[in-house]
Amino acid sequence: MSIDFRKENGIGKITFNRPEVLNSVNKEMAMAFQEALKDCEKDPAVRSVFITGAGRAFCAGQDLAEVIAADGPTLNSIVKDHYNPVISLIRNIEKPVVCAVNGVAAGAGANIALACDIIFAGTSASFIQAFSKIGLIPDSGGTFFLPRLVGFQRATALMMLGDKVKAEDALSMGMIYKMVADENLMEEALECASRLSQMPTKGLGYTKRALNFSMFNNLDDQLDVEEDLQTRAGKTYDYKEGVNAFLQKRTPLFKGE
Ligand code: T3D
């Protein structure tokens, strides 16, 4: 199976599983990834999503052997049908998506990571906007997320030059949330996904929605978004539980409702 997908303890755990080709993405894998994300979106028992790669890489982007195959998908279909739905799903699932970048993340693989809510990377991980080296433009939301994460100038240079960014540099640029020793990466990133899965899922989902809007809203529009979503958050079970638990000096038990 090109994707290992399991649901455990409130976490939808997705592992890219083509290690022999550094988890590069072919059609089958793209579709399986989309199905797993849709399952996570629909299933109320899943309260956080975790994405990582098997073997020594996170994901080397598009499977380049597939694009030269006579019966392979067209470039247009690869972007429209494989990657765009993946990025839309990651951003629109109203649950936190944590990723653990365990090695190289190149091309679409780098940009799939950048679309996630919280990015952990192992010390030996790296990020490469590999597209320019083969005459392509960055896709999978890269031109949207990277300039917002690291600034326009750095994003332009990284995308034009295709230089490898080591995890420590990605951290100092603000591209990722945390760098963790390779041997502790899975434990720490999963711990984060587990913690999030016990938190008020609706509130986290509304937070994500507000952050999505903040990418293009002006302040007045964003204040309206906050007013609306705060009103909704205030109607959730978990809000009442959080306030009651605080006043009763006990640990809250959130249900994600
Ligand atoms: O038509 C379209 O392409 C549209 C889609 C665009 C989206 C994109 O993602 S475009 C960008 C595609 N990705 C790349 O250009 C990255 C290609 N890979 C690399 O540059 C290098 O493999 C890495 C820098 C990622 C890692 O280098 P290294 O030296 O650690 O490993 P390696 O020896 O290059 O790779 C190991 C194996 O994985 C090797 O196979 P082999 O020789 O052991 O049989 C290699 O061919 C395979 N592999 C790595 N990346 C890909 C791949 N096979 C197919 N597609 C790949 N992307």
Image: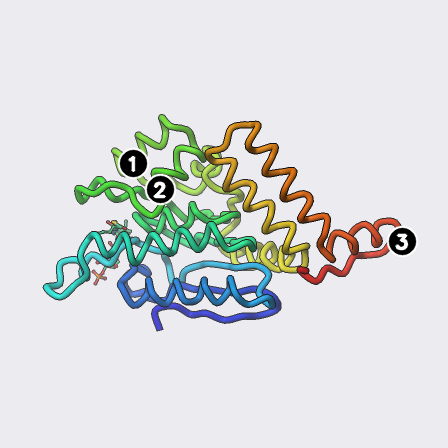
In this figure, which colouring scheme has been used for the structure?
A: rainbow
- The image position of residue 118, as x and y in percent, is 52, 47
Disc 2/disc 3 C-alpha distance (Å): 46 Å
Which mark identifies residue 183? Answer: none
**In-front residue for pair 230/105:** 230
- Specify the quadrant that holds the N terminus: bottom left
Secondary element at tag 2: helix
Amino acid residing under circle 1: Met
- The image position of residue 177, as x and y in percent, is 53, 42
Secondary element at tag 3: loop
Q: Which residue is mark 3?
A: 248
Count neighbours of disc 1 (C-alpha within 10 A) and say few if under 14, some if 14 to 19, many if 20 or more. many
- The image position of residue 203, as x and y in percent, is 65, 50
**In-front residue for pair 132/229:** 229
**Residue depicted at 73% across the width and 56% down the height:** 238
Considering every residue shown, the one lying at the far bottom of the view is 1
Amino acid residing under circle 3: Gln
Q: Which residue is mark 2?
A: 142
Residue 5: quadrant of the picture: bottom left
Residue 252: quadrant of the picture: bottom right
**In-front residue for pair 238/121:** 238
Q: Are marks 2 and 1 in contact (CB under 8 Å)?
A: yes
